[in-house]
Image: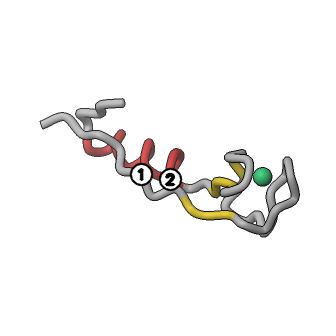
Amino acid sequence: MPVSDPELMKIVEARILNKKVCRRCGALNPPTATRCRRCRSTNLRFKKKQVAMKK
Ligand SMILES: [Zn+2]
């Protein structure tokens, strides 16, 4: 998703990246979660994907 506005970019980044993804089932969890809400796995990682920015 290309975003051109730098201010909007910060909001988008905070919203998209502030999540944990389960390595087992791929479910999205809140950043405060210690285990997956779907499969109860503790194997969670933070999203590291960069948001595409228009030049
Ligand atoms: Zn899971």
Question: What type is the residue that disc 1 sits on?
Answer: Lys
Residue receiving disc 1 = 49
Mark 2 is surrounded, within 10 Å at the Cα level, by few (under 14), some (14 to 19) or many (20 or more) other residues, namely some
Look at 44% across and 42% down and name the residue there.
Answer: 12
Vertical placement of residue 54 versus 43, above or below: above
- Name the quadrant containing residue 40: bottom right
Which of the 4 image quadrants contains residue 52? Answer: top left
Left of 37 or right of it: where is 25? left
- Please report contact status of discs 2 and 1: CB closer than 8 Å, yes or no: yes
Residue 9 or residue 53, whichever sits in front: 53
Q: Amino acid at mark 2?
A: Leu
Ligand 1 within 8 angstroms of badge 1 C-beta:
no
Of the 4 image quadrants, the one containing the C terminus is top left
- Name the element at disc 2: helix
Expressed as whole percent of the image width and height from the top left, the position of residue 2 reads 29, 31
- Most extreme residue toward the left is 55
Q: How is the image coloured?
A: secondary structure
Q: Residues within 10 Å of mark 1 (few under 14, many from 20)?
A: few
Question: Which of the image's four quarters has the N terminus?
Answer: top left
Q: Horizontal and vertical percent for residue 23?
A: 66, 57
Residue, disc 2? 17
